[in-house]
Image (cartoon, rainbow, N blue to C red):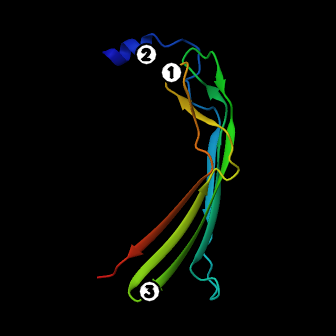
Amino acid sequence: MLHLLWLRNWPHGNRLFLAAKHTGSLWSTYIFQNELLRGLKPGGGIISVGKRQGDAANTYQLPAYVIGNLMASYQMKVGATLVTAQLNVNNISNEKYFVGTNSGVFITPGAPRTFLGSLRIEFEY
């Protein structure tokens, strides 16, 4: 019942806030097959979000943004164990952007350039 009351009070004709009209992402990786680079896997992608309304009353808009991400991993076999080391760089250009809001006065900024490393070890039984 509460949800129906909330929807009834929604401003008519306004765009849903934080819902961009245009958004998309693309990600791709490549695994080298030649002997010299076997195990190396680079990759990259982009995320694009169009401008969107910042609140239900459509009193302001959050700007559009495009961020790029990169990764590189190396996988090798050590005995019966598979070891993968990976480095990700998110928001490679350190773009300043806003991901959303939870009120009309507080806007959440997006993450700055971030480096994330990982090491995965897979054991065979």
Residue 57 picture location, percent across and down: 57, 14
Q: Taking 125 as reference, is 57 above or below it? A: above
Give the SS element for disc 3. strand
Which numbered tag is attached to residue 71? none
Give the SS element for disc 1. loop
For this orientation, the residue located farthest to the left is 125
**Three-letter amino acid code of the residue under disc 3:** Val
Which numbered tag is attached to residue 78? 3
Viewer-proximal residue among 33 and 112? 112
Left or right, residue 3 beside residue 89: left
Q: Residue tagged by mark 2?
A: 7
- Residue at (38% x, 76% y) in the render: 122
Q: CA distance from mark 1 to mark 2?
A: 17 Å
> Mark 2 or mark 1, which is nearer the start of the sequence?
2
Q: Are marks 3 and 2 in contact (CB under 8 Å)?
A: no
> Mark 2 or mark 3, which is nearer the start of the sequence?
2
Q: Residues within 10 Å of mark 1 (few under 14, many from 20)?
A: few
Give the SS element for disc 2. helix
For this orientation, the residue located farthest to the right is 93
Q: Residue tagged by mark 1?
A: 103
Indicate the quadrant where residue 61 lies: top right
Q: Residues within 10 Å of mark 3 (few under 14, many from 20)?
A: few
